[in-house]
Amino acid sequence: MMKINDQRLLANIARYAEIGKVGEIGVERIALSDEDKLARDLLKEQMLHLGLEVHIDQLGNMFGMRKGKKDLPAVAFGSHLDTVYAGGRYDGALGVLAGLELIQSLNDANTETDRPLVLVNFTNEEGVRFAPDMMGSHVYSGQAKLEDILNSVAYDNPDDTVRSRLKAIGYNGEMKLGSIPFDSFLELHIEQGPVLEKESVDIGVVEMVQGIHWTRYAIEGEANHAGTTPNIYRKDAGYASAKIIDYIGDYSRKQANPVLTTVGAIAYEPNTINIIPKKATFSLDLRSPDDEALSQAQTEIDAYINDIVTTAELTLNKEVLVRFKPVHFPADMVELVQTASENLGLSSKQMPSGAGHDAQMMSACCSSTMIFVPSVRGISHNIEEYTKDEDVVNGANVLFNAVLSRVYATN
Ligand code: HGY
Ligand code: MN
Ligand code: MN
């Protein structure tokens, strides 16, 4: 079994965590921001230092290619360097930097492989400023049109588009998406949930990723005076949205159905103590491993929203942002990770992923799978996000050996 250089990987993770540092251990590196650029520039420099061919595609996805002895489709691995607001240092970066480390370890050992290796940093996995999430891998795998995505507008600034920000940070690459053929894609990632830590298991062998629906709603009523307007004359967008958000929360809690519902973002206009809200905008994030249950939840929640809006004589604008189906990874890829974990003497558990990932998108174009390592207290998308050094190293070694078991051409 080959092993990575533990201290070098841990030092590199700490180095990237300084880019967009928040508090003690947190990181905020929003996609296509200046911080994202700094991290990308460092990755490019390190890729070149390792002798990799660096390619940037038209959506800013970054590829570091290590040639193989044969001209075959590449074994790819990686993740994303962007984070959520007030996020952590491991979500995404772990997969990219463990990939960089395994390449450096192969260079140290002067080991050649039949297949080329490609390290990938996908653009805008988090989707927090520009929808959809998993943007770079979603387009790379042919599931959305590049032009549509380049025109995606930032939630918080209509002047910023994906196209304008890619240009601003110098990552509006030339390479057509999908020009590097992949044999497979492997992603090491923190679990971002409590299971592995609770069950004291070293490695999560991910079998599937649940489906995701993202929608944004804007309800419009009429601003009016909080003191002079009797209830019967009110067109109160705030009150309507409160009833809806209560229904959405109950939907996931009251029924024994496998759907998680989250209203993560909400905004009132004019958002003033003595004015009845004219407008209420809120997001809806639905997750389920069961696509039927996901569609059913979307239908029922939309019906409830329409009913509330109509009865209160308000207006509604609904924007569909994401409709990603659950994805099951191929058994042979899951087996690869299972075997690598066992060969390294690590305990493992086959499990689903609650979060969306680039591997979920890459499944549409090549054999993909994921490796999880424990999240302390199951915390993620939070500046307290933490994974122990030994778990970081375990995950990187499993990725290393899973990749090695795929790089020798069978034919
Ligand atoms: O939303 C997700 O599950 C991922 O973090 N983008
Ligand atoms: Mn992630
Ligand atoms: Mn994330």
Image (cartoon, rainbow, N blue to C red):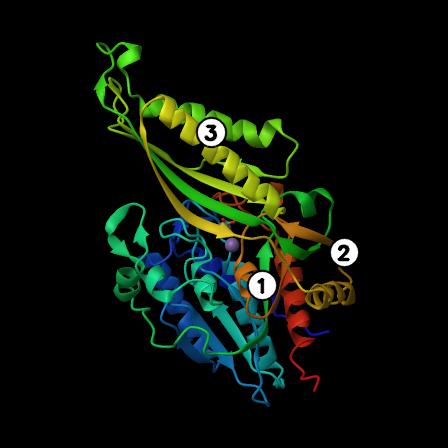
Q: Which mark is residue 187?
A: 1
Residue assigned mark 3: 304
Residue flagged by tag 1: what amino acid is it? Glu
Label 3 beta carbon within 8 A of ligand 1: no
Q: Quadrant of the N terminus?
A: bottom right
For the residue labelled by badge 2, is the local secondary structure a helix, a strand or a loop? Answer: loop
Which of the two discs, 3 and 2, labels the residue nearer the N terminus?
A: 3
Mark 1 vs mark 3: give the one in front.
3
Residue assigned mark 2: 347
Q: Which mark is residue 248?
A: none
Query: Which residue: 28% across, 57% down?
Result: 161
Query: Which residue: 42% across, 53% down?
Result: 132
Can the viewer see residue 118 in this picture? Answer: yes
Q: In this rendering, would 210 be left or right of 222?
A: right
Which of the two discs, 2 and 1, labels the residue nearer the N terminus?
A: 1
297 lies above or below 250: below
Which sits in the foreground, 79 or 398?
A: 79
Residue flagged by tag 3: what amino acid is it? Tyr
Which sits in the foreground, 305 or 169?
A: 305
CA distance separating discs 2 and 1: 19 Å
Picture coordinates of residue 136 (x, y %)? 43, 63
Mark 3 vs mark 2: give the one in front.
3
